[in-house]
């Protein structure tokens, strides 16, 4: 399992950063995903988002926004809300 994030899963004030929120939901569901830092910034043009993680996200989804989850079965889920919903609906059975 991999989760593609921007620069990390660090805390920020308020409701939290979308990448951290998605990562925390996976941890709460009993997963320990590989974190892929994708760097860059979603609204930038493709030629400015050349980091390996952003290129992989584009190959997986056709866009360059993170977070993106690649589950162990190959399912690709993009967006913090969808990743959180997936984690809540699919708790890790081996925990």
Image: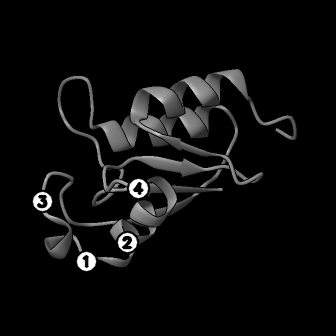
Residue at numbered disc 2: 55
Circle nearer the N terminus (1, 3)? 3
Query: What kind of element bears circle 4?
Result: loop
Residue at horizontal 14 percent and vertical 51 percent from the top: 43
Q: CA distance from mark 1 to mark 2?
A: 6 Å
**Callouts 1 and 3 close, C-beta under 8 Å:** no
Give the residue at mark 3.
Answer: 44
- Residue contact at pointers 1 and 4, CB within 8 angstroms: no
Classify mark 3: helix, strand or loop: loop
Mark 2 or mark 3: which comes first in sequence? 3
Question: CA separation, marks 4 and 2?
Answer: 10 Å
- Marks 1 and 2: CB-CB under 8 Å? yes
In the picture, the quarter occupied by the C terminus is top right
Residue sitting at x 60%, y 32%: 28
Q: Secondary structure at mark 2?
A: helix
Q: Indicate which disc residue 62 carries.
A: 4
Give residue 12's position: percent from left, percent from top. 21, 38
Residue 31 shown left or right of residue 94 in the figure:
left
Within-10-Å neighbours for mark 4: few <14, some 14–19, many 20+: few
The correct choice, above or below, for 55 with respect to 28 in the image is below
Colour setup of the view: one colour
Quote the CA–CA distance across marks 1 and 3.
Answer: 10 Å
């Amino acid at each position: 399992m991999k989760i593609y994030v921007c620069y990390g899963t660090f805390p920020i004030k308020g409701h939290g950063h979308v990448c951290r929120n998605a990562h925390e939901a996976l941890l709460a569901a009993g997963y320990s995903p590989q974190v892929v830092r994708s760097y860059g910034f979603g609204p930038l043009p493709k030629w400015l988002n050349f980091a390996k993680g952003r290129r992989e996200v584009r190959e997986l989804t056709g866009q360059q926004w993170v977070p993106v989850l690649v589950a162990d079965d190959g399912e690709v889920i993009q967006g913090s809300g969808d990743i959180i919903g997936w984690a809540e609906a699919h708790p890790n059975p081996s925990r």
